[in-house]
């Protein structure tokens, strides 16, 4: 039978406190104020075992990317801690008053929690992932195995089958799941049942292949340090990505793995092991006092970081700015965010320009909405009335479905109704097309096929620049201190996506938004003003420049840049515009 690798609660908490303490020090030294502020909030929540609730509440569309949250992985530890508060009470009640009928009580609770998780897959996907009621069934399966009177398997053939099935279920989850898979819910059955089957068959006296495999010394060794490995790996990944401003190279991936195992071993050897051995000097009262003191220390540290607004004084040669952008997207009516319900859209309120010409629909996600400030600022240049119809995370793809945003399907279907009812003859489509690459950009055909019978003229704007992280992090780490400089950085995707997208444009007029760049190198700051408010959405200034550079349907071309070395670039279908001032091909 495989050796148990579970750590006692005191050992787990001590390892956790040590890891968090080191993470705090690195975060203080590296992170810009807004990122340290976010870190401080997560530290405060993690210290009182509520980080799952904190990350759930902070999981909105404009929340910080998960990769830049060094304590993100503590959400699952908070779920466990919350579980440990309720489970002992429930176990006592069952033992004392219900005659140890463990399975009679636990199985209905497992089914209720699982049913709630399945239901929440579409109705509340973020809560479904983070909160205890929808994850409790996964933990309770282990409790049922430990407490239930389930007879051990004695048939070697049956034991082998159960073991292989358990391995297969886990392998399927590892290799088949991706970001398009809904989780938890039904799909969580694969790893959970697989693990349960392996634990169950591990009790069998016949020792099937799966048990012998998992009992090999290298795997047992990984199991021994597994908790420490879980604790240390994510901060390493997060800080490396923050510093490198790019995906890790193969050599960096190897370095991450080596560093994670090395630190995990040190944590296991010098933190976990001493606490596993009885020490007369460490009494229960001292342990309790030490634990409470550690919790209080981290809670105070997190609260101070929040109150200090991320300690902006640490970066004296760099001042983080408040950048205007999505606050001018007409949120709640024209840009539908957290729960996009098309019934909240209002045509009158969402008309961006006041010309007497025909109506034009700007349809897409936030990468359509980030053109709105520029359209409004240059409204007099448009001979048409542009209507904004945008929703967070909803690309203008009629066939698109997302478990995270199930209302996108209705939102996009309603766009066709708007076009038909208002007799709109021109539509502008754009989106965060990089999100669709794994699904297939050919899904665009579903929208074009829906528009073709209506005789609609379609403009398709390609992928606009996206960077690896917030442009202020790039500026702090790599940017120039020259106030007159034009700072540039490499985009975080292959610019060839626009070539691929153009292939599916059909008769639509395609506009390459990457022509403001020099290949994959794009401007993100010009003369001290940021052209983006985060890693990918235009600021007000960037939006205006993008609209001037390539947005379709101007009545008259804008005034060209004053610099004598400026030249215009020919755009698709003679839609000529100057590039970003100081930032594009010359």
Image: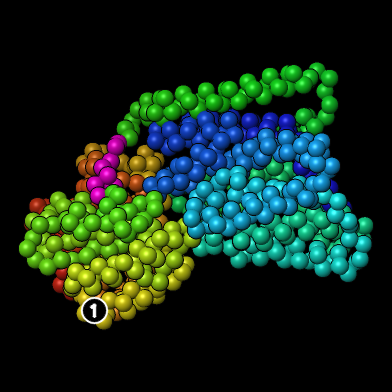
What residue is disc 1 on?
454
As drawn, the residue found furthest toward the front would be: 97
Secondary structure of residue under mark 1: helix
- Residue plotted at (55% across, 38% down): 51
- Residue plotted at (47% across, 42% down): 57
Viewer-proximal residue, 114 or 263? Answer: 114
Residue 197, given in percent of the width and then of the height, sits at 78, 59
Left of 523 or right of it: where is 57? Answer: right
Residue 256, given in percent of the width and then of the height, sits at 60, 48
As drawn, the residue found furthest toward the bottom would be: 453
- Residue plotted at (62% across, 24% down): 294
The image quadrant of residue 547 is bottom left
Q: In this view, does 567 lie above or below 72?
A: below
Viewer-proximal residue, 40 or 476? Answer: 40
Residue 128, given in percent of the width and then of the height, sits at 54, 51
Main secondary structure along the magenta-highlighted residues: loop
Q: In this view, does 331 lie above or below 96?
A: below
Task: Specify the segment rendered in magenta.
Answer: 321-330
Left of 525 or right of it: where is 272? Answer: right
Left of 470 or right of it: where is 47? Answer: right
Q: Is residue 47 above or below residue 328?
A: above
Residue 229 falls inside the magenta stretch? no
Local packing at callout 1 (Cα closer than 10 Å; few below 14, some 14-19, many 20+) is some
Residue 264, given in percent of the width and then of the height, sits at 68, 41
The image quadrant of residue 250 is bottom right
Viewer-proximal residue, 164 or 23? Answer: 164
- Residue plotted at (48% across, 55% down): 123
Q: In which quarter of the image is the C terminus?
A: bottom left
Q: Can residue 367 be seen in this view?
A: no
Viewer-proximal residue, 246 or 82? Answer: 82
């Amino acid at each position: 039978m495989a050796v148990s690798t579970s750590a006692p609660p005191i050992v787990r908490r001590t390892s956790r406190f040590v890891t968090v303490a080191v993470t705090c020090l690195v975060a203080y030294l590296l992170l810009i104020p807004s990122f340290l502020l976010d870190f401080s909030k997560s530290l405060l929540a993690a210290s009182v075992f509520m980080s799952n609730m904190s990350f759930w509440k902070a999981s909105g569309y404009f929340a910080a990317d998960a990769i830049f949250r060094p304590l993100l992985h503590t959400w699952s530890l908070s779920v466990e801690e919350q579980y440990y508060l309720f489970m002992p009470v429930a176990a006592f009640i069952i033992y004392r008053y219900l005659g140890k009928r463990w399975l009679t009580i636990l199985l209905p609770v497992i089914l209720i929690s699982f049913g709630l998780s399945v239901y929440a897959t579409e109705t509340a996907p973020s809560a479904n992932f983070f909160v205890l009621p929808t994850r409790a069934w996964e933990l309770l399966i282990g409790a049922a195995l430990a407490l239930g009177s389930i007879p051990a398997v004695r048939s070697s053939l049956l034991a082998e089958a159960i073991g292989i099935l358990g391995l297969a279920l886990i392998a399927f989850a590892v290799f088949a799941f991706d970001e398009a898979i809904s989780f938890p819910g039904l799909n969580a059955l694969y790893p959970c049942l697989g693990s349960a089957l392996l634990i169950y068959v591990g009790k069998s006296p016949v020792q099937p292949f799966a048990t012998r495999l998992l009992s090999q010394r290298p795997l047992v060794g990984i199991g021994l340090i597994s908790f420490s490995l879980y604790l240390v790996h994510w901060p390493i990944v997060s800080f490396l990505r923050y510093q490198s401003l790019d995906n890790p190279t193969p050599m960096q991936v190897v370095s991450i793995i080596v560093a994670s195992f090395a630190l995990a071993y040190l944590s296991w050897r010098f933190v976990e092991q001493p606490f596993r051995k009885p020490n007369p000097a460490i009494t229960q009262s001292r342990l309790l006092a030490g634990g409470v003191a550690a919790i209080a220390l981290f809670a105070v540290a997190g609260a101070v970081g929040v109150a200090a607004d991320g300690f902006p004084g640490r970066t004296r040669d760099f001042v983080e700015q408040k950048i205007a952008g999505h606050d001018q997207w007409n949120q709640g009516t024209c840009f539908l965010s957290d729960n996009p319900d098309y019934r909240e859209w209002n045509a009158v309120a969402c008309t961006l320009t006041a010309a007497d010409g025909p109506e034009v629909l700007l349809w897409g996600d936030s990468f359509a909405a980030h053109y709105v400030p520029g359209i409004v600022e240059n409204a007099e240049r448009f001979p048409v009335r542009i209507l904004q119809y945008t929703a967070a995370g909803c690309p203008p793809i009629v066939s698109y479905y997302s478990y995270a945003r199930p209302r996108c399907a209705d939102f996009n279907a309603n766009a066709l109704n708007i076009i038909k009812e208002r007799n709109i003859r021109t539509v502008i489509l754009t989106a965060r097309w990089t999100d669709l690459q794994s699904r297939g950009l050919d899904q665009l055909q579903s929208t074009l096929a829906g528009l073709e019978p209506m005789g609609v003229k379609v403009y398709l704007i390609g992928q606009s620049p996206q960077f690896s992280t917030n442009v202020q992090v790039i500026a702090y780490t790599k940017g120039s201190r020259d106030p007159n400089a034009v700072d540039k950085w490499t985009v975080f995707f292959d610019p060839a996506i626009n070539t691929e997208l153009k292939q599916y444009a059909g008769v639509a007029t395609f506009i390459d938004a990457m022509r403001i760049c020099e290949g994959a190198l794009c401007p993100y700051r010009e003369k001290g003003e940021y052209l983006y408010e985060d890693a990918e959405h235009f600021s007000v200034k960037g939006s205006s420049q993008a609209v001037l550079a390539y947005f379709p349907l101007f009545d008259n071309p804008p005034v060209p840049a004053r610099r004598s070395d400026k030249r215009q670039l020919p755009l698709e279908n003679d839609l000529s515009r100057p590039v970003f001032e100081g930032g594009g091909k010359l």
